[in-house]
Image (cartoon, coloured by chain):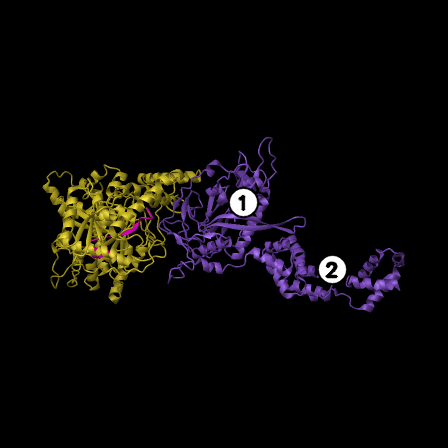
Amino acid sequence: MQFDQSKCSVLKGFVTIKDGCAHVVPAAAVDLYFCSVSPGPCGGRLSTRTMLGRTLREVSAALKQGHITPTELCQKCLSIIKKTKFLNAYITVSEEVALKQAEESEKRYKKGHSLGDLDGIPIAVKDNFSTSGIETTCASNMLRGKGYVPPYNATVVQKLLDQGALLMGKTNLDEFAMGSGSTDGVFGPVKNPWSYSKQYREKRKQKSHCENEDSNWLITGGSSGGSAAAVSAFTCFAALGSDTGGSTRNPAAHCGLVGLKPSYGLVSRHGLIPLVNSMDVPGILTRCVDDAAIVLGVLAGHDPKDSTTIQDPVKPFVLPSLTDVSKLCIGIPKEYLTPELSSEVRSLWSKAANLFESEGAKVIEVSLPHTSYSIVCYHVLCTSEVASNMARFDGLEYGHRCDIDVSTEAMYAATRREGFNDVVRGRILSGNFFLLKENYENYFVKAQKVRRLIANDFVTVFNSGVDVLLTPTTLSEAVPYTEFIKEDNRTRSAQDDIFTQAANMAGLPAVSVPMALSNQGLPIGLQFIGRAFCDQELLTIARWFEKQVQFPVIQLQELMDDCSSVFENEKLASVSLKQ
Amino acid sequence: MAAPMLRLCCPGRRWALACIDGCSRHRRGAPNGCTSSRKRGQSSVAQQPFITAQKPRKGEHEWAAVVGLEIHAQISSKSKLFSGSQVHFAAPPNSLVSFFDASLPGTLPVLNRRCVEAAVMTGLALNCRINKKSLFDRKHYFYADLPAGYQITQQRLPIAVNGSLVYSFCAGKNRSQVINKTARVKQIQLEQDSGKSLHDDLRSQTLIDLNRAGVGLLEVVLEPDMSCGEEAATAVRELQLILQALGTSQANMADYEIQRQINELENGGEILNETRSFDSKLGCTIPMRDKEGKQDYRFMPEPNLPPLLLYDTESLPAGADPQQVIDIDRIREQLPELPSVTREKLVQQYGMLPEHSFTLLNEVGLLEFFQNVMKETRAEPKKVTSWVLNTLLGFLKQQNLAVSESPVTPSALAELLNLLDRKAISSSAAKQVFEELWRNEGKTPAQIVSEKKLELMQDQEALEQLCHAVMEGHPQVVMDVKKGNPRAINKLIGLVRKATLSRADPTVIKEILEKKLAS
C-alpha cells in the first residue's frame, strides 16, 4: 500500500476507549484496510489510519485524549476521499473549509476547551442541505447550472458546525432526492463501497461466473447514497441524509450502516431543500447506534425557523444500557411479509425475532391493515408537494436560466425543461394533475385520508402494548447497477420504499441496523419503528440488537490494493475509473 | 386596499359578472370572488334598487346590481407575515428581502404574531366569529413577482368568518336622515402580498422589486349585499376608518387607490356586463382574458405551518407562555372605539348634525383637529364645527392639503374663535385673521388683530360721531328712511361700517342710527 508513511508515524500512545459500542473494529480489519501498523518508537501505538475505521465515539475519545489531532484526522479523511473518488460519493469536497475548521478545533483541544463529542470529527452532508458559501446542487442542473451557493446554513448543518464538526463535503444523491438508488442525479450514480469489499469479492470468486468485475458494481440505494458511501468508505464518521420515504434507511441497509430517521418534528428542516415537507426528516448515517444517538443529541430540538419542530425541550440523548429485554414487546407486522421479500432477508428477519424471543422479549404478530395502500397514497402526496415545492425554480431568483427571452412564460418553460430531469418533471406533472380543482377531492384529499388511516394503524398497534416494530428495511441486498436500471425510477421507488415510507407517513422514528451479510457477502439491515418522539427508546433497543448481532466491518483492502497503483497518479485514476 | 369585485346580477335568466380590479397584483383575481351569484326573479335581489343606467331591452328582465367586495388591506406591522424583513414604503428596491421572501430553497415560513393579532382584532371589530383553529393554504400561479410560485393564504379555514360591516350614509332633502346598511362579512383571511413588477417597455424588460413580497394582508370578503356603487364606496370607506381606528392597517397606503376605486364604484353601477379588470395605467376597465378567469390555482395545504390555534380565557392552557398563545378575550378588551361610536358621541355631546360627524371622521386627522380646538376655546361647538368644516376644510381642499399640513394650528384657530366669541372682532374680521394665519407668518391671531387694527370699535362716542357724520353727508338716504323705506337704514349702516374699516359691530351701529333718526 502506498500510504504516506510520515503520517503513519504520528503515534500518541494508547487509545483507551470504553467499550460502550458493539461496533468495534477488529484489529485485523483495520490492518487490512490501512496498512500494518509500524510499531512506533514506544511500540504498540495506534496510527491515525487505524482511527479511520473506528466509530465516532471512539475517535472522539481519542481526540480528547490527544492521541490524534483534528488536522491529522481531517487530512487522512481527505486522502481517503481522493482515493475513493471513483465511488462518486461526493459532489463537492470542501477541503479548505474542513482544514480550517480542523485548525480551529485543534486550537480548542490545545486549550482544553473542546466543544463536545463532535469537535474535530469529520462529517459529510447530503447535497440537498443548504451550506453557507458552499455550492449546493441537489444533483440537479437547475441549481448546478449557475452554481447556486446558499447564503445560509441549514439549522442541522449549523448545529454540527457549532459543535466543532469538520465539514468534508457535500454528498451525491438522486436529483432533488427523488429516487431509491442514488443513480438518477446529474453527477452520475454512486457506487457501493461493498462492491469492492473483500467479503463480497471472495464470494463472487467462489461463484466463478465472475465476468467483468468493474461493470458489476452495486448501487448504494438512495437517495442518500452518497452519504452512505462516504461513511461506509471511511471518508467521515457520520453523514447527514434526508429521509422522505426511506432515503436514509435504504442506503444504510445496503451499505452496512446505521440509518436513523428521527421523529418528524424532532429535528429542524430549515435549510433542507424539500422533497415532501410533511414527510421530510434529516437523517443520520453512522457506523453504530451510539454514534447516531450522539448526532441526534446535537441535532434534536425546537428551531424557531421551523414551525413544525416540537416546542418541548429535548433531553440529551444518552442511551441507557439495556441488558434485559424481557419487558419488551416486539411487534412483527404481518403485512410486511410480501412475496417480493427475498428469502434471505426473510430468514434474517425471523432470526432477529427469535433472538428477541430467546432473550425473553414478547414477540407478537401485529397488523397494519392499510399498509398496501401506502405506496400509492405516498405517490399522490409526494408528487403533489413536489409540484408545489418545485414551482420556485423558475430561473428568476437563482439557479439555471435558459437563453430564451421571448416571453417570461417561454423562459419558465425552457428553464424548467433544461433544469429538471425526467423524474422530477414527471413528478411535477402528476402532482399538478392531482392538485387540479377537479381532481383534488378524488386524489389529494383521499390520499390524506388514507395517510390518516396508516398513521392510525401504528397508533393502534403501539396502544396495544407494542414497544417497537421489527421489519425488514429493504426487499433484498444491494443489486448491481446494470440490474437496477432495468426498471425505471418510479417502479424502483415504489418497490424499494415499501417497508420504509409508512414511517414517514406517520411521522414515526425508525432506524435501520445492519444485521448480517448475505450469501453474496453483502449487508442486510433490519428496521425498527418506534413510537412518535420515543427516539431514545428506539435507539436503546436498536443498540441492544446491534450488540447481539456483531455485524462485521467492511474490508476494503482489495479495493485499495487494486487501485493503489493508479491512485498514485490522479490523472490516470480519473481515466481508468470513468466508466 | 384594493380589488373590490363587482358582481352584477340579473333576477332573470341572464346574469353578469363584473370585476373591477385594483392593483396589478390582483389581475389574477381570486376565485372565490368570481363566483356568480345568480338569483331568480323572486329573490331578495328583486327588491333591491335597480341600477337603471342600462335600459332593459324590450321583453327582458331589468338588471339589478349586486356588489360584493374583496378588500385587501395591508397590515400595519414592523415585519412581514412570514419573515423578519421590515415593512417600509419607498425603501430602495429589493432592500427589504429576506431569504424566505426571495424563496431561497429550504427556507420556511414563520408566522408573525402581530399579523395574527391584527386579523383577530379586525375580525372582532367586524362582529366575526373568530375561528380558534385556522389553516394556511398554498395558491399556485406562475408570476414573476411571486418568487415561490405560490402565495400562502387561508382558503379552507380562514381566521374569521360570518361578520357584518355596518355602514351609514346621510340621505334626504338636507342629508339629515341617516340610513344604516349592513353588508355581511363572509370571511377575513391572512395572506401574503406579492412583489412588484415594473415593465420597461422600451427595453422589453421586467424589473422585479420584492420589498412588498410577503407583506401581510388582510383580505376582507364582503358578501354581495350592496346594491350600487355608492353603497360599496361607503362600505369601503367605513372599513377603512375601522381599520385605521384599530391600527391594524393604515389603509392609507393608497388614498389615491381608494379614491380611484370609490370613483370607479360610483360609476360602477353602470353597464358592466362582462368580467372586466381595471387597468390602472389605461385608467379604464378592460375585459379580463379568459385564461386568467379560468386559472386553476391548485390549492394545497401549506405543510410547513401547523394549524393556527387561538384561545379565549376559558380555553387558555394553564401555564401557557403568553408569547406563544393568543387570547381572543384579551384582544377584545383592548379594542378601541369604533368610528360609528365616535360619530354617535359627537352628535350626543355637541349636538352636531350627523352629516357633520361623518365629514369630521372621513378626513384623516380632522376629528383630532376639531377636538383640539374644542379643548382650547370657549366658542360654541356649532361655531367650531362650522369653522372647521367650512373655513378650514375649504382652504385645505382648495390647496389640496391634508389636515396635517394645515398652516393654521388648532391652537391658533381656538384663539381666533375666542376673540370672536368675546366680540373683540367681527365675523368678517375673523375671516381676515384666518387668511393671515393661513399665510403662516408666525403671528398669533391677537398680533394680527392689533397690527391690522381689526378690533371692534368699543368707543361709543367716536361711533356716534361717525354715525352723525354719515347722516350729515347723506341727507337723501336719511330722507328715505324717514319716508318709511326700511331698507334705507342698511345703506347707512354699511356706510358707517365702511368708515370704521369694518371694525364696528353692525348691531351697535344700527342702534345708534335708529336713536339718531328717531330724535
Q: For mark 2, name the chain.
A: B
Residue placed most toward the observer, A314 or A201: A314
Task: State the image coordinates of residue A398 (x, y, percent, origin top left).
Answer: 38, 47
Q: The yellow chain is which one?
A: A
Q: Is mark 1 on a helix, strand or loop?
A: strand
Look at the image and say whether residue B375 sits in the magenta stretch: no
Q: What stretch is highlighted in magenta?
A: A276-292
| Residue linked to disc 1 | B225
| Residue linked to disc 2 | B428
Task: State the image coordinates of residue B221 (x, y, percent, origin top left).
Answer: 49, 47
Query: Left or right of A182: which side holds B275?
Result: right
Which image quarter is the C terminus of chain A in?
top left
Mark 1 burial class by Cα count in 10 Å: few <14, some 14-19, many 20+: many
Residue at the top extreme of this rendering: B59
Query: Left or right of A362: which side holds B172?
Result: right
Residue placed most toward the observer, A57 or A327: A327
Q: The purple chain is which one?
A: B
Q: What element carries label 2?
A: helix
Q: Nearer the viewer, mark 1 or mark 2?
A: 1
The residue type indicated by label 1 comes to Asp
